[in-house]
Image (cartoon, helix red, strand yellow):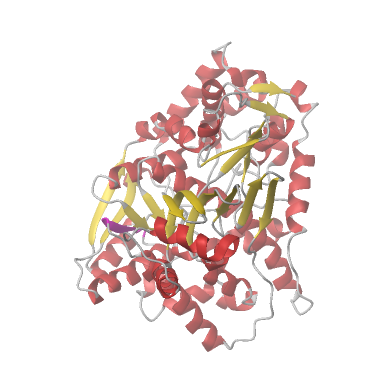
Amino acid sequence: MIEKYSYGEYVIVYNGQIYNTKELKETLSENGFTFNGHCDTEVLLKSYIHYGNDVVHHLNGIFAFAIWNSRKKELFMARDHFGVKPLFYTMKNGSLIFGSEIKALFEYPGIEKKLDNQGICELFGIGPAHTPGTTVFKDIYELKPAHCATFNSYGLHIERYWKLKSEKHTDSFGTTCQKVKFLLNDAITRQLVSDVPLCTFLSGGLDSSIITKFASNYCKDNGLPPLDTYSIDYVDNDKNFVKSDFQPNSDNYYINLMNRDLHTNHHQIVIDTPELAEYLEDAMIARDMPGMADIDSSLLLFCKNVKKKMTVSLTGECADEIFGGYPWFFREDALNSGTFPWSIAIDERQRLLNPSIGQKVNLKSYIDYRYNESLSEVEILDSDSPETAEKRKISHLTLNWFMQTLLDRSDRMAMYNGFELRVPFCDYRLAQYVWNIPWEIKALNGREKGLLRYICKDFLPDEIVDRKKSPYPKTHNPTYLTKVKGMLADIMKDKNAPINSLLNRDYILEILNTDGSAFSRPWFGQLMTGPQLMAYLCQVNMWLERYQPKIEI
């Protein structure tokens, strides 16, 4: 969009959604601005014209944008508070090249694809997460969440415009519950505004049930048709499901319970196992890097099918990060691991590397550096109890690393299909308030997300409120293991497969011969074990083949 004024011309490129458009538009109208339509792009641009670079302090939404100010000969870029929307950049001969995808940068002449020591550490030590601000490619960067940048004749200047502020929590328990409920309801209500078909993803877990309950009420209160809800399952999962401590039960019973309670228009998308493997490459292309294996490809397929009727969905993503829902918030071994608790198998990760590479690339040193660097950013209060201080640290890591991985996944897999996912739990006002709630209140009754459960007990069925956290559903079909095992075995037999120069062949064969159990612990998160590791290595090979980076170690 281009806006011309007597004092200059402004051009904006923008990806995202602004949720306080109405308030911004009212303020701008009071200050003499007129509007040609109803799109938030125009409101965002005119907000910048009004507020200048301070516009970021007035935005509530998910966004990545760049605005050219012809009068000042200056480019201004910004990314939303938690980085839901991506923004990448690099420098070439004094020029700034930027885009929403890394692949877009490579369309610019002379931008090289290089994989150096740090990139290897990111791929094999941190992946499928990544260090904020970096990418696996040398000299290709991301603008960090909650950061903005100006580029002019003086060069590129980047600054942080927002961060979670640690303050003493003084509200009573009753007031705390009221504020959390208000902020959550307000976030959901704002994100339900849409001029295209909208639905919610419903797994029958606490988080998606909360979103669906508020959304269903909104539809009823505004005279709208019954809410559409969608869930995912896998062919023969009813036969193959194996319960565990992390995934104690399947979703279908709880989904049906919520549908009966709310009378939603529910749709179940069933995905077959071969598709999960077949779409691993598409999922990698969507991210421009290897990702969460079938956890990615299943979401990509899910969004592809939902997009046939819908354009936007609200999800319960990020409640676990905001309210403390993961096992590592409670397990002493995870809290005391001295590393990222979702990725503690560092020695096993190092073993994946060819010994000649391993002599030059020390994954543990790199991970330790990034871990301690991140912890140094945590603001601990003198009034924090030892437990609250410890939980602030683990929350900071979870919000800035693990949640970023999930947000990347959600946005890339959805947008690959022209589909939009919205994440009300990621509202920065809600996150800021919950950040300072003492741990003993967040984990009320010793439960994960105990406070959130308490708040919901008067409007959700007891079985939903009391249901133990269950992660994103994955396939339990043994044919998935057979499929990815065969794919990796074929790669190992291929002398031209680029990944083979990086891998410890003996260890990979051991992993193949033991169906993945030679890698003794989940290599990422709670449920990503042998099959997902094999799929990830296949994605790394696909990535190397497609992008063909020059390896500089």
Residue farthest to the top? Answer: 495
Q: What x and y, as percent, mark residue 532?
A: 52, 37
Residue at left 56%, top 77%?
Answer: 444
Residue at left 57%, top 17%?
Answer: 492
Q: Height in image: 213 above or below 350? A: below
Q: Is residue 470 left or right of residue 418?
A: right
**Residue 107 vs residue 244, the one in the foreground:** 107
Rendering quarter of residue 225: bottom left
Q: Is residue 370 visible?
A: yes
Q: Is residue 298 left or right of residue 87?
A: left
Q: Height in image: 359 above or below 429? A: above
**Residue 510 vs residue 55, the one in the foreground:** 55
Magenta stretch contains residue 51: no
Residue farthest to the front? Answer: 6
Q: Quadrant of the C terminus?
A: top right
**Residue 128 vs residue 465, the one in the foreground:** 128
Q: What x and y, as percent, mark residue 142?
A: 61, 44
Q: Which residues are magenta?
A: 196-203
Q: What x and y, as percent, mark residue 263?
A: 22, 68
Q: Is residue 212 left or right of residue 331?
A: left
Rendering quarter of residue 416: top left
Q: What x and y, as percent, mark residue 33?
A: 41, 67
Q: Is residue 312 left or right of residue 113?
A: left
Residue at left 61%, top 54%?
Answer: 148
Q: Height in image: 392 above or below 405? A: below
Q: Height in image: 551 above or below 199? A: above
